[in-house]
Image (cartoon, helix red, strand yellow):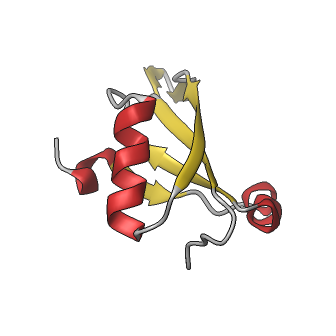
Amino acid sequence: MEYRDIIKAPIITEKSASLESQNTYVFSVDVRANKTQIKQAIENIFNVKVENVNTINVKPKTKRVGRYAGKTNKVKKAIVKLKEGSSIEL
């Protein structure tokens, strides 16, 4: 898997913006990626040093449109804390 395939997009919300002051960033990542792969991808793409990575698996929700029911896609989020002196420009 390529590094750009692992990291899909940054998640920019009020909560994730408040975490940036603590040198922590939130990304949407590939569901099959593990913490080590996420750490390597962030370090290579953004040229920074990662302190630790926490992940969250978001389960799919059931949605309805009229009589048709389906599910949303499952998502994996990575909360990445960078070492002192490192920062990412989003």
Where is residue 19 drawn, in percent x and y?
A: 78, 58
- Give left or right: position of 31 versus 89: left
Reply above or below: 80 against 12.
Answer: above
Q: Farthest residue toward the bottom?
A: 89
For image coordinates 57% across by 31% down, the residue present is 55
Where is residue 72 drawn, in percent x and y?
A: 47, 31
For image coordinates 64% across by 58% down, the residue present is 83
For image coordinates 46% across by 24% down, the residue present is 71
In depth, the one of 1 and 77 nearer the eye is 1
For image coordinates 80% across by 62% down, the residue present is 14
Quadrant housing the C terminus: bottom right
| Residue 30 in sight in this render | no
Classify residue 12 by image quadrant: bottom right
Reply above or below: 20 against 36.
Answer: below
| Residue 61 in sight in this render | yes
In depth, the one of 65 and 13 nearer the eye is 13
Quadrant housing the N terminus: top left
